[in-house]
Image (tube, rainbow, N blue to C red):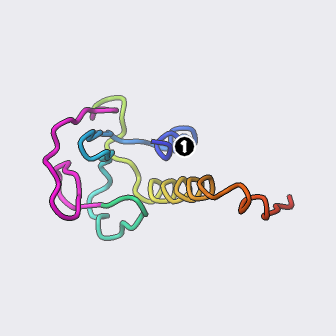
Amino acid sequence: MSAVDAMIDTGQDVGPLLCCITHRMLLIPVESGTAGLWGAAHSACSSGSALQCVMHGYQPPCRNRFWVAPPGPLAAPTSAPAVLHETLSLMRARMRFARRPLSARAREVCHV
């Protein structure tokens, strides 16, 4: 969700968002033909029009799903895959940095 918030904050179009509570996933439709180019960490992309959770191994079926932003007049038709990929990567880098112990972060210095 933080990546979606960042996209909205920078004026990027965000398409429909379907949340699956069972698998703790957010399903975001992207432009047709881009599944093969996808490679953002903590995400997966599958081709086709069905909004299904992409899982490895046996997983229970999706039971608890709801629209965070339903398809319709308020959402864009899809989220731009390149922008979504970049934003997810930036958010992942921030989360990785935030999880490191303070002692490891204190050794880094930024000069502006």
Tell me the crowding category of disc 1: few under 14, some 14 to 19, or many 20 or more residues within 10 angstroms, Cα based: some
Residue 93, how many percent across, how many down?
57, 59
Tell me if residue 30 comes above or below residue 41 in the rendering. above
Which residue shows up at 23% across the image and 42% down it? 22
Queried whether the magenta region covers residue 62, the answer comes back as yes
Q: 48 or 21, which lies in front?
A: 21
Query: Which residues fall within the magenta stretch?
Result: 45-71
Task: Reply yes or no: does residue 51 show up in magenta.
Answer: yes
Most distant residue in the right direction = 111
Residue 42 located left or right of residue 21: right
The secondary structure type at the circle numbered 1 is: helix
Give the residue at x 28% y 33%: 67
Give the camera-side residue of 102 and 35.
102
Left or right, 39 with reference to 109: left
Q: Residue 9 placed where, x, y %? A: 56, 38
Q: Quadrant of residue 33?
A: bottom left
Which residue matches tag 1?
A: 6
Q: Tag 1: residue type?
A: Ala
Left or right: 94 in relation to 57 = right
Query: In percent of the image, x 32 and y 39: which residue is there?
Result: 17
Work out which quarter of the rendered image holds the C terminus and state it.
Answer: bottom right
Quarter of the rendering occupied by the N terminus: top left
Q: In the current view of this chain or complex, which residue is farthest to the top?
A: 73
Is the magenta region chiefly helix, strand or loop?
Answer: loop
21 in relation to 102, above or below: above
**Spot occupied by residue 89 in the image (x, y as percentages of width and height):** 51, 60
The residue lying at 36 percent from left, 29 percent from top is 74
